[in-house]
Amino acid sequence: MGKLTLTTFLTLDGVMQAPGGPEEDPSGGFAYGGWLVPFADEGMGEFVTEVFDRAGAFLLGRRTYEIFASYWPQHDDPADPVASKLNRLPKYVASTTLKEPAWGPATAIDGEQLQSEVVRVKDATEGELQVHGSGALAQWLLARDLVEELNLLVFPVFLGGGRRLFPTGGLPTAFELTGSRTTSAGTAIHTYRPTGRAAFGTFA
């Protein structure tokens, strides 16, 4: 049985939109694409490699799938742990409109059956069923308690606008910190495991 994990790049104010370049996702007039690039360092690369080494399959939103599909098939180095896994492992795309994804091996999962299919695919996966980016999908999974491990890479930059991972109205959830490190560029990398509903108290 596999485990569903979510790995996300965030700014200090929680923005996850278009970390890798201006063209990734300019929706909503977002003008700060590529904010991660100045902070990419060896420590970040080492952690990302560790994550992809555990991958058994990928679950992606349509936008992230299309961003990956436009890049990784042209950078298919079998020695690269990211390229080799993304190009060869099964990919499941959450979409109501994408019927025949061209970058395979890939299967589109319709929204009406998404929850049951995610559970089925995860249970059949050896290793991790990994979600990368995929903001709307990530929020949908978190709201249904389907994420079993959360890797947050928090970069030392504040943007003041953009799509955030944790929206207002999200499900109050407590987490246990299971791993933490800091890279030379100042990126804080935390791994969390959900422990249930958030608890509340008073010091009075």
Image (cartoon, rainbow, N blue to C red):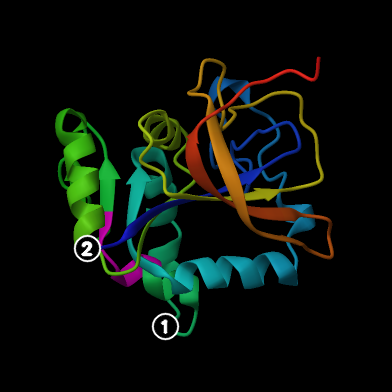
* Magenta stretch contains residue 88: yes
Residue 170: image location, x then y, percent: 50, 22
Residue 173: image location, x then y, percent: 52, 31
The C terminus, quarter of image: top right
154 with respect to 124 (left or right): right
* Tally of numbered tags: 2
Residue at the spot of label 1: 78
Vertical position of residue 156 compared to residue 89: above or below: above
The part of the image, by quadrant, that contains residue 111 is top left
Q: Can residue 142 be seen in this view?
A: yes
Q: What stretch is highlighted in magenta?
A: 86-91
Which tag, 2 or 1, sits closer to the chain's start? 1
Residue at the spot of label 2: 105
* Magenta stretch contains residue 16: no
Residue 119: image location, x then y, percent: 23, 46
Q: Residue at x 40, y 39 (%)?
A: 63
86 with respect to 182 (left or right): left
202 with respect to 19 (left or right): right
Q: Can residue 98 be seen in this view?
A: no
Q: Residue at x 78, y 56 (%)?
A: 39
What amino acid is at disc 1?
Answer: Pro
Vertical position of residue 14 compared to residue 57: above or below: above
114 with respect to 16 (left or right): left
Q: Which residue is drawn at 80% across and 34% down?
A: 158
The part of the image, by quadrant, that contains residue 29 is top right
